Image: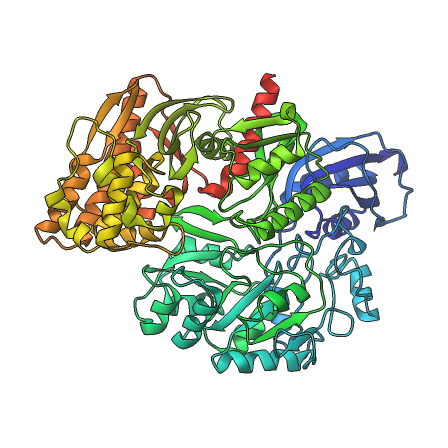
């Protein structure tokens, strides 16, 4: 009866655009016999519904409990204030989007999602009209962040706006019962993007299009060639992972001599043939995010495996993310190397002309298409450690999903990030949005990518930052960018390791103070020196340093990072004196004699005179030194290579710790590695196989960490511990440290959604800036 009829306005906040939420609302409301409409309003959804009270209640409950799989409902507001009451019997419709006047938090942009099972079945069904169409998608899958150019999320605000729907697609788009109802990237072979093949990097003769383009690319890959494939968020370089000659050629052309390549395989069964994924790793591989997952290999790949991931027993695997990837994998029936379309240290290419220019010397052919890429997104990288997921690189599939902001801010802020593994974060209200991995800020090209990412974040989130948080280090390009774009009174300097542990604490929504353990390569300390092995007591506004590693010189400055042998010489000749002698020259002779004599003499002189030898209390540099002393890495071609070699050498062996000691210096507990390094060299001199001291070294650092935390707690530190910094990508170190701390009754936290390394710095900076602004 009309007298039982009520009207409600329901506003739904969260990731509710681009995830099939409006079609879901329309079907749900119609099934309950409600009248009204739903529309996108800026970054959220507004529903005006009328019907029986009980039906309205069931409708509101179902909005949260039955939402589509890619949807995240964060808040539902319901009120009786309905400006336009839906007429009885009018039915329920999807209305045109509108803009909001007030935006209390960032708009949420949905990440890209891998091809769903329903679309995959259609892709290989000869009876389906989208049979073998590379750009197949629906409301449950497909491109999102990489095609969105504005919000509210509708087709005209995507890079699909230049592809008018054909009658068949238009009918699906308008049909509430169809899986593609309001699927904005909707397309088919008749009206959508089309593949194109370019035989070389020049803009001259154009080769086949459509299925013929795919066949040309597959033929070249099968013959051992390298193809640049236009992916969701940028170009990817693809070759046959089983042909070591092709992989080595890609290494030479890409200037990437040692860093492992990611490998794409057809499905979980194919993954299990070349690796040993755990249950957690299998779940990660098959998730809609489709990240690269670091998994133990099967040690049966021969020369090709050594070419793909030299020096490590872990293989970076991922499953196809798009219809195009599925077609390539199914047709070629072999694992493929799929890596970023760039030269080392450059941002990935996204524009067609730029790709054909920059990748012309790498790729033998280009498999492109005519859908523009709205935003640059590399592949995400993850690993699982005893069932716990760690994000190493947060990009496609994960970014730009929002993160919690534990201290609300009315003033929009931006975290400018660090120098390496760069990201940036904008924040307002109770949420932060971290953009995708940009890379290492090393030159004008990467700075251009940085600025493009910032412009995208501002435009899409609707957050215009008024305050910037940046690193203390003046030489960082991100710090210089902050100084160029914001006046001094709107800049907040944040210490590097405080940002690391704040990011971990914020992800876990901690409220009170916490103990932070930050182990990484190098970060600027508030005393003007370089830090990297830090024990801090902190909250979101301040911190107190209570422990550290002993300092050692970096001969040649940060060039020592690329030369672990030089770093080892720094420890041998310049380790901070803390009461125990450094390793003797006699004990170190087997190490020094295999190095160039002139380099040893020059380095010793530099250290003795303090010439270009900044000192650092770095856990990462100590790992480098240990790797060099054990003969595992004298020089490296990518960051972390020496530490990876050390962890790989240690294997699963369990060994007792080497000698170590803590001393009190300037009010801090300090780890003195002199006895550790002396024992390490002693084991080598005695003929002990390298894996045993490598394993013992890991045990030592874990015991040292537990002892430093125990001393801090005894002095009044909280028992909740946040582990952060790139050193904790080391699975063995993370596992051993966590186990020992828990045995001492401590609560141990490590980031999962936020990168544990420098990719999480911008989020930590934004969190700290918000807290300091609230403090005033």
| 398 over 296 or under it: above or below | above
In the depicted view, which residue is nearer to us: 123 or 522? 522
What residue is at 27 percent from the left and 27 percent from the top? Answer: 670
Relative side of 129 to 233, left or right: right
* Residue 125 percent across, percent down from the top left: 63, 76
In the depicted view, which residue is nearer to us: 722 or 601? 601
* Residue 257 percent across, percent down from the top left: 40, 63
* Residue 196 percent across, percent down from the top left: 68, 75
Q: Quadrant of the C terminus?
A: top right
* Residue 313 percent across, percent down from the top left: 32, 60
Q: Residue furthest left?
A: 686
Relative side of 743 to 291, left or right: left
What residue is at 75 percent from the left and 53 percent from the top? Answer: 23
| 52 over 542 or under it: above or below | below
Q: How is the image coloured?
A: rainbow
What residue is at 41 percent from the left and 71 percent from the top? Answer: 248
Q: Quadrant of the N terminus?
A: top right
In the depicted view, which residue is nearer to us: 294 or 67? 294
The image quadrant of residue 135 is: bottom right
Relative side of 536 to 739, left or right: right
Number of marks in the image?
0
Can you see residue 754?
A: no
Can you see residue 590?
A: yes
Relative side of 77 to 448, left or right: right
The image quadrant of residue 583 is: top left
């Amino acid at each position: 009866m009309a007298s039982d009829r009520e009207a409600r306005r329901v506003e739904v906040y969260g990731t509710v655009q681009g995830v099939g939420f409006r079609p879901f609302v329309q079907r749900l409301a119609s099934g309950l016999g409600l009248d009204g409409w739903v529309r996108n309003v800026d970054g959220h959804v507004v529903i005006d519904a009328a019907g029986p009270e009980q039906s309205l209640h069931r409708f509101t409950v179902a909005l949260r409990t039955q939402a589509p799989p890619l949807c995240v409902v964060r808040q539902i507001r319901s009120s009786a204030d309905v400006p336009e009451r839906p007429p009885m019997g009018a039915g329920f419709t999807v209305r045109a989007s509108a803009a909001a006047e007030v935006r209390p938090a960032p708009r949420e942009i949905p990440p890209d999602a891998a091809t769903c099972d329903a679309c995959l079945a259609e892709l290989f069904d000869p009876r389906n009209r989208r049979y073998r169409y590379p750009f197949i998608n629906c409301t449950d899958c497909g491109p999102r962040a990489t095609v969105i150019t504005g919000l509210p999320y509708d087709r005209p605000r995507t890079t699909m706006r230049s592809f008018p729907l054909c009658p068949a697609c238009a009918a699906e788009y308008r049909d509430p019962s169809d899986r593609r109802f309001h699927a904005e990237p909707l397309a088919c072979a008749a009206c959508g993007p089309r593949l194109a093949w370019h035989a070389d990097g020049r803009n001259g003769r154009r080769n086949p299009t459509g299925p013929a383009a795919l066949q040309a690319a597959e033929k070249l890959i099968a013959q051992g060639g390298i193809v640049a494939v236009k992916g969701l968020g940028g170009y990817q370089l693809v070759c046959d992972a089983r042909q070591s000659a092709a992989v080595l050629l890609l290494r030479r052309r890409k200037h990437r001599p040692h860093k492992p390549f990611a490998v794409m395989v057809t499905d979980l069964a194919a993954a299990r043939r070349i690796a040993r994924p755990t249950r957690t790793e299998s779940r990660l591989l098959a998730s809609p995010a489709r990240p690269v997952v670091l998994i133990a290999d099967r040690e049966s790949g021969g020369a090709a495996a050594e070419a793909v991931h030299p020096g490590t027993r872990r293989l970076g695997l991922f499953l196809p993310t798009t219809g195009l990837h599925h077609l390539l994998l199914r047709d070629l029936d072999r694992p493929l190397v799929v890596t970023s379309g760039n030269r080392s240290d450059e941002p990935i290419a996204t524009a067609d002309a730029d790709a054909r220019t920059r990748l012309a010397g790498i790729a033998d052919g280009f498999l492109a298409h005519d859908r523009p890429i709205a935003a640059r997104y590399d592949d995400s990288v993850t690993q699982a450690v005893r069932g716990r997921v760690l994000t190493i690189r947060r990009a496609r599939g994960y970014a730009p999903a929002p993160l919690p902001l534990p201290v609300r801010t009315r003033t929009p802020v931006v975290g400018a990030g660090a120098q390496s593994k760069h990201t940036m974060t904008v924040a307002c209200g109770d949420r932060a949005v971290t953009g995708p991995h940009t890379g290492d800020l090393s030159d004008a090209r990467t700075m251009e990518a940085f600025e493009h990412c910032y412009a995208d974040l501002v435009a899409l989130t609707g957050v215009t930052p008024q305050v910037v948080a940046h690193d203390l280090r003046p030489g960082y390009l991100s710090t210089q960018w902050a100084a160029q774009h914001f006046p001094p009174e709107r800049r907040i300097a944040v210490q590097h390791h405080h940002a690391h542990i704040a990011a971990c604490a914020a992800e876990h929504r901690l409220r009170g103070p916490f103990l932070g353990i930050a182990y990484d390569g190098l970060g600027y300390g508030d005393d003007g020196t370089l830090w990297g092995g830090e024990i801090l007591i902190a909250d979101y506004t301040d911190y107190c340093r209570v422990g550290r590693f002993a300092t050692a010189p970096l001969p040649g400055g940060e060039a020592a990072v690329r030369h672990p042998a030089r770093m080892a010489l720094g420890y041998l000749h310049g380790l901070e004196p803390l009461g125990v002698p450094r390793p003797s020259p006699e004990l170190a002779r087997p190490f020094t004699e295999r190095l160039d004599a002139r380099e040893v003499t020059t380095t010793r002189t530099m250290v003795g005179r303090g010439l270009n030898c900044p000192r650092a209390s770095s856990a990462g540099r100590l790992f480098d030194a240990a790797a060099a002393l054990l003969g595992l890495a004298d020089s490296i071609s990518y960051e972390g290579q020496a530490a990876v070699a050390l962890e790989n050498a240690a294997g699963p062996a369990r060994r007792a710790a080497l000698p170590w000691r803590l001393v009190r210096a300037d009010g801090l507990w300090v780890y003195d590695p002199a006895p550790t390094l002396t024992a390490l060299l002693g084991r080598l001199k005695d003929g002990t196989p390298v894996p045993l001291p490598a394993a013992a070294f890991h045990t030592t650092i874990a015991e040292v960490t537990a002892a430093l935390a125990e001393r801090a707690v005894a002095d009044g530190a909280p028992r909740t511990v946040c582990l952060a910094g790139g050193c904790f990508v080391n699975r063995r170190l993370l596992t051993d440290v966590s186990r020992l701390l828990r045995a001492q009754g401590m609560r141990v936290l490590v980031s999962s959604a936020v990168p544990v390394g420098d990719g999480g710095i911008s989020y930590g900076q934004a969190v700290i800036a918000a807290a300091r602004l609230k403090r005033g």
